[in-house]
C-alpha cells in the first residue's frame, strides 16, 4: 500500500481561502466550482455551488451535460474539470436510477481524453478493463453494461441503499477506463436536493490509491440558506 502524503503546496502567494470558477447557466440559475485552501495552501475541499434557481426550468426532453472549469487554485488536487449531467428521466438500471437526477462528475482526465472514449470496438474492451483488485475501492464492483462514451465504465457499491430495496436518493460512483480511475461521482435525485439536505457521507477507499489525484474521504450535500444555493463537495481530500 502506498503511504499517504500531503498534497503539493500551492504557490506561496496563494493565501488560505475559497476560490471559485466561472459560472455556467443551468436551468433558471447557475453552477460554478470552488476550492477551499487551508493555511498551508493545500486544497481540502473541492465542490460545486448550484443555485436554488438551477433546479427550476431544467430541460425535460433529454439528458444535458454542463461543463464547469476549475479555479487555478485547484490545480494541486489533480482534477481537470467537472461535468454536471442532468438526467430528466434517469438512466439504467431501471427501477434503481430511473428518477430525475444529477450526476456530478469530477474528472481527472481532460476533455480531449474524454472525447477519445468511444466504447466501440477495441475501445469497449478498454472501457471494460477492471483495475487491479487493490485499486478497486472496498466493496465496489464494475458491472457490465455501464460503459458510456466520453465517460468510461461506472463502478458501484452493491451495499448502497438503492440496492437494498431502499429508494435512491444519493450515492457515490467511481469511474474507470483502461483499468484506471478517471472520475469520482456523487449522484443524487432532484427530489433529494430540493429537500435542502445537510449530510456528509464517508467515501470508501481502495487499498492502493492513484497518486495522480486527491481522493475524498467523504462527500457532502448541503443547502446554504444565506446564499440560496446547494454545495456538493468532495471533502477531506488526500493525495497519496
Image: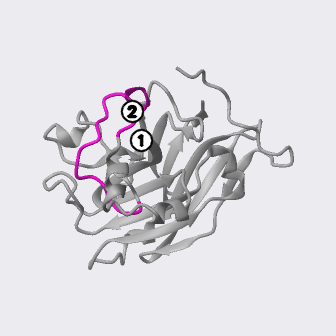
Give the foreground label among 2 and 1: 1
Q: Are the residues at dot 2 and dot 1 in contact (C-beta closer than 8 Å)?
A: no
Figure check: 181 above or below 139: below
Task: Answer with the quarter of the image where residue 60 lies.
Answer: bottom left
Which residue, given by chain and number where applicable, does mark 1 sit on? 179
Where's residue 71, x and y in %? 67, 59
Check if residue 146 falls in the magenta segment. yes
Where's residue 202, x and y in %? 42, 33
Q: Residue at x 48, y 61 (%)?
A: 114
Q: Residue at x 59, y 35 (%)?
A: 211
Alpha carbon separation for disc pair 2 and 1: 9 Å
Which residue, given by chain and number where applicable, does mark 2 sit on? 136
Range of the magenta residues? 130-150
Q: Which mark is residue 40?
A: none
Predominant secondary structure, magenta span: loop
Where's residue 222, x and y in %? 45, 49
Amino acid at each position: 500500500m502506498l503511504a499517504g502524503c500531503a498534497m503539493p503546496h500551492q504557490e506561496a502567494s496563494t493565501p488560505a481561502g475559497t476560490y471559485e470558477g466561472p459560472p455556467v447557466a443551468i436551468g433558471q440559475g447557475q453552477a460554478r466550482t470552488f476550492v477551499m485552501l487551508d493555511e498551508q495552501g493545500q486544497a481540502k475541499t473541492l465542490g460545486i455551488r448550484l443555485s436554488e434557481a438551477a433546479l427550476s426550468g431544467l430541460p425535460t426532453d433529454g439528458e444535458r451535460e454542463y461543463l464547469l472549469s476549475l479555479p487555478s487554485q485547484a490545480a494541486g488536487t489533480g482534477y481537470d474539470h467537472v461535468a454536471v449531467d442532468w438526467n430528466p428521466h434517469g438512466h439504467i438500471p431501471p427501477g434503481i436510477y430511473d428518477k430525475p437526477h444529477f450526476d456530478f462528475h469530477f474528472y481527472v482526465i481532460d476533455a480531449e481524453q474524454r472525447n477519445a472514449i468511444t466504447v466501440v470496438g477495441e475501445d469497449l474492451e478498454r472501457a471494460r478493463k477492471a483495475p487491479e483488485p487493490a485499486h478497486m475501492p472496498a466493496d465496489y464492483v464494475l458491472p457490465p453494461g455501464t460503459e458510456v462514451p466520453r465517460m468510461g465504465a461506472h463502478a458501484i457499491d452493491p451495499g448502497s441503499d438503492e440496492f437494498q430495496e431502499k429508494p435512491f436518493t444519493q450515492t457515490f460512483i467511481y469511474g474507470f477506463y483502461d483499468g484506471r480511475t478517471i472520475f469520482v461521482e456523487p449522484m443524487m435525485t432532484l427530489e433529494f436536493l430540493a429537500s435542502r439536505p445537510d449530510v456528509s457521507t464517508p467515501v470508501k477507499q481502495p487499498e492502493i490509491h492513484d497518486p495522480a489525484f486527491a481522493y475524498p474521504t467523504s462527500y457532502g450535500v448541503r443547502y446554504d440558506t444565506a446564499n440560496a444555493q446547494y454545495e456538493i463537495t468532495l471533502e477531506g481530500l488526500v493525495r497519496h
